Amino acid sequence: MSSFEPQINAASTATLGTEPIIVAKDVEKWYGNGFHVLKGVSLTVNKGEVVVLMGPSGSGKSTFIRTFNGLEPYQGGSIEIDGIAIAHDNKGIELVRREVGMVFQQFNLFPHLSVLKNITLGPIHLRGMSPSDAEELGMSLLDRVGISHQASKYPGQLSGGQQQRVAIARALAMRPKVMLFDEPTSALDPEMVREVLDVMRKLAESGMTMVCVTHEVGFAREVADRVIFLAEGHLLTDTTPDEFFNHPKDERVKKFLSQILH
Amino acid sequence: MNYAFDFGVIWDNAGVLLAGAWLTFKISLLAITFGLIIGIIGAAFRTSENRILDGIALAYVEIIRNTPYLIQLFFIFFGLPNLGLKLSAEQAAIFSLAVNFGAYSTEIVRAGVQSIAKGQIEAGLAIGFKKLAVFRYIVLPPALANVYPALIGQVILAVLFTSVVSQIAAEDLTFAGDYLNARTFRSFEIYFTIALIYLAIVWLIKLLSFLVERRFFEFAKYRR
Ligand SMILES: Nc1ncnc2c1ncn2[C@@H]1O[C@H](COP(=O)(O)OP(=O)(O)O)[C@@H](O)[C@H]1O
Ligand SMILES: [Mg+2]
């Protein structure tokens, strides 16, 4: 076990399900071309919760979670992360971003840095950590995602699944309060999906607050506390995985499930 | 053909030639270093969301790339003193070459910056880096790697361009050649040797650039 895990547990499990950490209210967003992508979306996520976000392609899932760390500005409503308001124009956003980890579909590892340096870059420059402390942290995180033996390689030398696990470790190195995942397994070959989901599952068990855009039904059923469904910029349902998959009420959810469950 | 070659003139004046070669090398190295810094800043301006910065850099690039270098050199050496900025021939040579190389490298580095995927920038921002730090730590190194061959080509052109500074009596390698030629009339031997020395300097710079590439851009081999 890494030195990192107990800290998460201490921070979150004690307050599971009681203390809100993401509070989004009536979020409205238009893209520059006038497209109304988020039409008053509200969501509260409590500490330690795992929320899976599903919905048809183009429904606004990515846009929505990207407003949580200010990668997308928004125009109406409000968003708070751990009590800190995210301004519509993202002023002063850097401090919030340090507390919010994000994992992307395309991994987005930095190709010019070794695996270990990908992980230590943030802690050294933004957390004021000494290089040796950051390396120790980096190695323990790589150990945790099962690739410590690749620490000195470049990202281009790793498989997709390995790269995505490094990306998770890189986000965790900032000791975030919340982790956002935007279709983390969609760009992977099928045989690599599982190794990434296993890491996410362990992370959930350690008490991390997670919002995951994913169409991995098995993961959603077993790991999620709640499944929310977005369609055309509206949040249609917010319910338990059991209700969502076994007793869907909304016609659009039923249609969506028939497509992803074949 | 009854011209009798006499390379003795080269050995007799080796000191003059070496001094010229050294100045050429020094001017090249300094101008390229400063010019690259200008180019990196220029590329940051050209790719910034701030239209004013973009405009300033664009105007600079357009002016420098569309006027003769010799005129730029004369302007800086003979024109600026009218404004009270008096530079020595060597300083004017370095300054004008840096400004010139800066404009070309701005465009080369800009192409490199624009070749970096948006996801790289987003990943840096998501960690909490400010835009400038994202540029410095995340965008710039792979951007330079992507345009490294074009940049080295421009570096070599800059070295060859330095011969023009003999026109303001900066005592570079070409100046040394002209000087010896006027005294000995051994034009063939002198300019042949000067050409060889330029070739040697360019090869030296190519070697240095190869070492830099191996040291800093090893990762580029593994990129897909
Ligand atoms: N930069 C943009 N400008 C205009 N429209 C965009 C932009 N980014 C995304 N969109 C549109 O917004 C909608 C929602 O996109 P997105 O949030 O990526 O959906 P999802 O992640 O659910 O597939 C899509 O119709 C998409 O085409
Ligand atoms: Mg998406």
Image: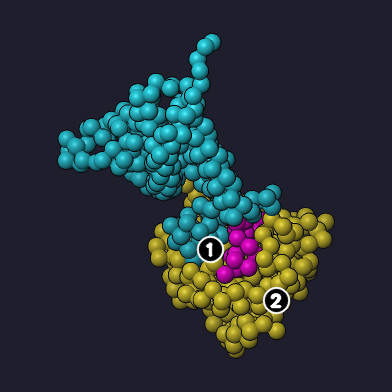
From what the image shows, is residue A154 above or below residue A4?
A: above
| SS class, disc 1 | helix
Q: Nearer the viewer, mark 2 or mark 1?
A: 2
Chain coloured yellow: which letter? A
Residue density around tag 1, few if under 14, some if 14–19, many if 20 or more, within 10 Å: many
Give the image quarter of residue A159.
bottom right
Q: Quadrant of the N terminus of chain B?
A: top right
Per the rendering, the colour in which chain B appears is cyan
Question: What's the residue at 51%, 71% (across, down)?
Answer: A124
- Name the residue beneath numbered marker 2: A144
Q: Is residue A117 magenta?
A: yes
Residue indicated by mark 1: B126
Residue A144 falls left or right of residue B88: right
Image x and y of residue A75, in percent: 44, 57
Around disc 2, counting alpha carbons within 10 Å, would you say few (fewer than 14), some (14 to 19), or many (20 or more)?
some
Q: Amino acid at mark 1?
A: Ala
| Residue at the image point whose x is 64% and y is 70% from the top | A169
* Residue depicted at 24% across the width and 41% down the height: B87
Name the spot of residue B45 as percent of width and height, x first: 40, 46
Magenta-colored span = A102-120
